[in-house]
Image (cartoon, rainbow, N blue to C red):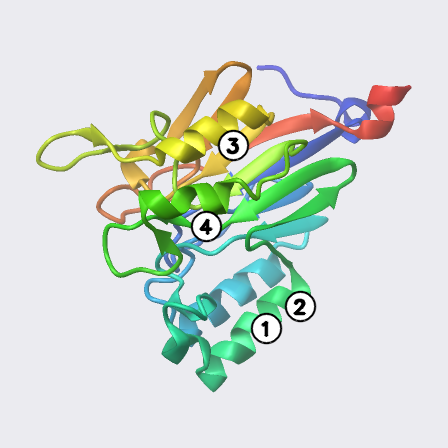
């Protein structure tokens, strides 16, 4: 087994990715620099679930950056579809705490040490969940991704990668326009969750696709957070 030396680790930026924890957040995470959660940290947007998630994030003291997007279960983050949840005073307290203390992306981007990361909570509609869109609405959302994005975070998967849903008939349920847009932008990574049974990694045209759903299809714990490293920018230009 090969272990990286301290000097090499200092030249890299390590990302630890997970999604769909549904209040069953892991007790211990592998050490890293950037923690990414791709949504569905609650079961239904209850303020107590968000509070539990905030407390868990506070305990992850080893990370320099903690980047969060919401998902279709996180109703109290969606002011348009679920104003009754969004406007709840207790929920707003927890939502504001998350947004003020961590990096929350909602069709927006952040620059992490020279790497541009764009995040969105949207996924294709299949039940009355938060941030869900129809295929006709997809273009309006995904065209907002900047062309020079290095890492794209979405809750829902693109078509053909990590999107095989195990129902009566196995089928790909990912977003076709999202996949087209990702192929056009060519980010280094596209990271998502939503389809628990789609957990894993795949590659196409130099893009790494990561479904980092933490819970399995039956909502049992079993998948591990997925990690990767990128060279620090100052090391690239030396």
**Helix, strand or loop under label 1:** helix
Mark 2–mark 1 distance (CA, rounded to whole Å): 6 Å
Provide the residue designation for mark 1.
96
Q: In this view, does 227 lie to the left or right of 139?
A: right
Q: In this view, does 236 lie to the left or right of 218?
A: right
Q: Point out the tag, 3 or 2, that comes first from the N-terminus.
A: 2
Decide: marks 2, 1 in contact (CB < 8 A)? yes
In front here: 92 or 186?
186
Provide the residue designation for mark 2.
100
Q: Point out the tag, 2 or 4, that comes first from the N-terminus.
A: 4
Decide: marks 1, 4 in contact (CB < 8 A)? no
Q: Does residue 2 lie above or below 33 as drawn?
A: above
Q: Give the x, y percent position of residue 5.
A: 75, 22
Q: Point out the tag, 1 or 4, that comes first from the N-terminus.
A: 4
Mark 1–mark 4 distance (CA, rounded to whole Å): 23 Å
Q: Badge 1 local density, few (<14 within 10 Å), some, or many (20+)? A: few
Decide: marks 2, 4 in contact (CB < 8 A)? no
Provide the residue designation for mark 3.
190
Decide: marks 1, 3 in contact (CB < 8 A)? no
Residue at image point 43% right, 29% down: 179
């Amino acid at each position: 087994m090969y272990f990286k030396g301290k000097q090499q680790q200092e030249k890299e930026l390590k990302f630890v990715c997970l999604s769909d924890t549904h209040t069953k957040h892991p007790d211990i995470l592998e050490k890293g620099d950037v923690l990414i959660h791709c949504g569905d940290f609650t079961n239904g947007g209850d303020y107590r679930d968000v509070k539990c998630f905030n407390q868990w994030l506070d305990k992850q003291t080893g990370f320099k950056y903690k980047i969060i997007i919401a998902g279709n279960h996180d109703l109290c983050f969606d002011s348009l579809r679920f104003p009754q949840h969004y406007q709840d005073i207790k929920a707003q307290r927890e939502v504001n705490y998350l947004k003020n203390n961590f990096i929350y992306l909602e069709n927006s981007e952040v620059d992490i040490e020279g790497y541009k990361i764009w995040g969105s909570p949207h996924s294709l509609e299949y039940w009355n969940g938060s941030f869900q869109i129809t295929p006709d609405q997809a273009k309006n959302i995904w065209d907002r991704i900047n062309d020079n994005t290095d890492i794209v975070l979405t809750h829902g998967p693109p078509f053909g990668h990590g999107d095989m849903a195990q129902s009566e008939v196995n089928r790909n349920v990912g977003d076709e326009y999202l996949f087209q847009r990702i192929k056009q932008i060519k980010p280094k990574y596209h990271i998502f969750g939503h389809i628990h049974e789609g957990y894993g990694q795949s590659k196409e045209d130099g893009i790494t696709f990561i479904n980092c759903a933490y819970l399995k299809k039956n909502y049992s714990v079993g998948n591990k957070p997925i990690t990767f490293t990128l060279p620090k920018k100052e090391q690239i230009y030396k």
